[in-house]
């Protein structure tokens, strides 16, 4: 759940402009609509999005990889690239 300025800076830092579409969800509207939120308000961080990767083709979700709490196993670039090639 980052704003457009954070996503823009991240894209520039990673030299992703024109290659990866960096999309912001500053109010967590998308995360809420997809059921991919968790609430860290008690820790001063507000509503956040779970870690996930999603392959969308022409507006249709083809794959959705949601990480377990504290994990980084299925939302990585290698997994997404393998799914995109399949």
Image (spheres, helix red, strand yellow):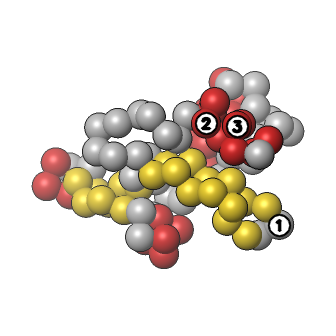
For label 3, the SS is helix
Furthest toward the front, the residue is: 86
Which marked residue is nearer to the observer: mark 1 or mark 3?
Answer: 3
Q: Residues within 10 Å of mark 2 (few under 14, many from 20)?
A: few
Residue beneath disc 3? 82
Q: Which residue is mark 2?
A: 79
Q: Please report whichever mark, 2 or 1, sits nearer to the chain's N-terminal start.
A: 1
Residue 10: horizontal and vertical position, in percent?
Answer: 61, 33
User: Left of 46 or right of it: where is 19?
Assistant: right
- Mark 1–mark 3 distance (CA, rounded to whole Å): 19 Å
**Nearer-the-camera pick, 21 or 78:** 78
Question: Dot 1 lies on which element?
Answer: loop
Q: Residue placed at 52% from the left, 51% from the top? A: 65
Is 84 on the left or on the right of 31, as rendered? right
Q: Residue furthest left?
A: 42
Look at the image and tell me whether residue 3 can be seen: no
- Percent x, y for residue 47? 32, 60
Instruction: Residue at 69% x, 44% y: name it.
Output: 83
Whether pointer 3 and pointer 2 mark residues with C-beta atoms closer than 8 Å, the reply is yes
Question: Compared with residue 18, is residue 52 higher up or lower down, i.e. above or below?
Answer: below
Q: Neighbour class for label 1 at 10 Å: few (<14), some, many (≥20)?
A: few
Q: From the image, tell me which residue sits under label 1.
A: 58
The answer to whether one can see residue 36 in this image is: yes
């Amino acid at each position: 759940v980052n704003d457009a300025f954070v996503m823009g800076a991240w894209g520039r830092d990673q030299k992703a402009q024109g290659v990866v579409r960096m999309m912001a969800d500053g109010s967590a509207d998308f995360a809420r609509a997809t059921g991919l939120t968790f609430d860290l308000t008690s820790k001063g961080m507000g509503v956040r999005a779970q870690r996930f990767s999603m392959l969308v083709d022409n507006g249709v979700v083809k794959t959705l990889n949601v990480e377990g709490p504290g994990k980084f196993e299925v939302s990585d670039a290698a997994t997404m690239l393998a799914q995109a090639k399949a």
